[in-house]
Amino acid sequence: MNSAVYTTFFGFRENPFNLTPDPRYLFLSPYHREALDHLVYGIKERKGFILITGGIGTGKTTLCRALLSHLEESTKSALIFNAFISDMELLRAINQEFGIDRDQEGATKKDYVDALNRFLLENFSRGGNAVLLIDEAQNLSHGVLEQIRMLSNLETEREKLLQIVLVGQSELRDLLRSPALKQLDERVMVRYELRPLHFRDVERYVAHRLVVAGGMGNLRFAKGAFKKIYAYSKGNPRRINAVCDRALLIAYAEEKHTVTRSTVMRAIQELHGAVRGEPMIMDWSWRRFASFTILLLLLIAVAAFAGWSSREQISGLLSGGRGTTATPVTKGKVEVRMAPPERVKPKDATLFLDEQTSLAGLFGLFQKRVQDGDGNVPSGASLSLVSFNVGSEYYVMFKKPFRVTLPRSNQDPAETAQYLLIREVSEEGAVVVDAEGKGRTVSRDFILSHWGKKVFCVYPFDGKNINLNKGMSSPEVLEVQRILGGRGYLVPTTGDYDEATFRAVMKFQRDLGLDPDGIVGPQTMSLLYQMTK
């Protein structure tokens, strides 16, 4: 049933609980008011970098859109809502948003930055300001974040020409605290963490949305309904919208104009049913607990039936000791066989591959890329397996298939090492290959929570064993410079291994956890290769 069908029934012009980030529906709770004040202050006072973070569904995107109406007419704005872009794509998008005209054909990074700088200077000379707002910034790669940091250098002797607002999930704070982004983090002058609504604000939030949607007051939420809404949503606006939307559907179907506590409870049950099929580890942790609880109750019932004399067998079964085989318990003519509890496999178990399966799959994915003409493999090269200890924040930079070891906390201690085989990074998170060879899209949070640092990649080694070092000049040096430049490192593309290239290589090695010796050996080269398409 479509939610649009109830709008006429309740007298609305539109759906009051649509999940789209419409600024008209922004409810200024104390937290949202403070966040908006921080944004306006940071932009007006030309603070440079502003950071707004918050959990999923707390209203960050809606806040971003509402911000535009609070800016002065002299303030130009550029909004970027797709964070899965390269540094060149970012510069192109910024210039397009600001309406900067230039020929796109053959434009270089320097061309885009120079054009942006001219626009900002002209805008500043007319007394104007400029703001760049990037939503979902936790998805930005390190290379793009480094490019954004460089844009903050566009300034006069006293004023910042461009105010940069980074909006993202709470993990963005941790991302900026990584050693690789220390310089950017130190430039953030205004910070605010957006929090969920208090219980006292939930009723006002719902009433606000009903009024904006054109409600005539013929719909009422009971007090008990708000308590259940808050208990389910924990003050998260997106969850409030979801449960209220479903509750109105139920009320419409029953031709009622009052949303009661029982209506909300039913809505919550239906929402859980709608998401039951999603691959959520927490859901399966609960099921494991529920299965164990049911088993325990069953054993208690068996013990009561079989008599106190069976306590040793039951104790052994629960403790995982010798009571692991079926044990007959007899009383009179009744015989009950207690089988050992089976281990409940997690729903995503097929994503957790063993050594042989993951390794064969990794080389298979690489070979397929080669067959499709997308492997960039030198003729006569032999394939080798290389590994690195890489932080989870860097996974978005990988352009080729790789596997990562699961952290020990995510593995069965009695089993050998297990791996995730990642075919490609996606906007949602990544495409992971399961034991049947099928690709399954998982979220960014799933990847981060199952990241064990040890990453394995396939590298075509051509046998030359050349270590690139300072003072050398070659096409290989030029290729390294191009790759580093594409990842946001400041390096000239001359083919000469000069001091600037040496420092850039050392910084790259330090950021990715390699030995920072400034020499591009097989390990550094293979990691650079992994970051090219």
Image (spheres, rainbow, N blue to C red):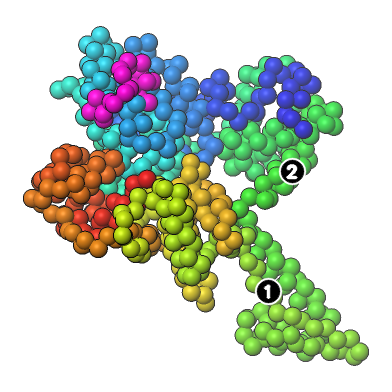
Residues drawn in magenta: 93-111
Residue shown at 23% from the left, 17% from the top = 118
Viewer-nearest residue: 96 or 44: 96
Which class describes the residues within 10 Å of circle 2: few (<14), some (14-19), or many (20+)? Answer: some
- Image quarter of the C terminus: top left
Viewer-nearest residue: 487 or 445: 487
Q: Residue furthest right?
A: 333
Residue 37, above or below 370: above
Q: Position of residue 37 (x, y in %)?
A: 40, 25
Viewer-nearest residue: 13 or 101: 101
Judging by the rendered image, the residue that carries numbered circle 1 is 342
Residue shown at 26% from the left, 16% from the top = 119
Q: Secondary structure at mark 1?
A: loop
Which class describes the residues within 10 Å of circle 1: few (<14), some (14-19), or many (20+)? Answer: few
Q: Amino acid at mark 2?
A: Glu
- Asked whether, in this view, residue 308 is left or right of residue 148, the answer is right
Judging by the rendered image, the residue that carries numbered circle 2 is 270
Q: Secondary structure at mark 2?
A: helix
The answer to whether one can see residue 376 in this image is: yes
Q: Quadrant of residue 249?
A: top right
Q: Quadrant of residue 145?
A: top left
Q: Which mark is residue 371?
A: none
Residue 497, above or below 451: above
- Image quarter of the N terminus: top right
Q: Position of residue 178 (x, y in %)?
A: 31, 49
Q: Amino acid at mark 1?
A: Glu
Residue shown at 27% from the left, 44% from the top = 483
Q: Quadrant of residue 104?
A: top left
Q: Residue furthest front?
A: 380
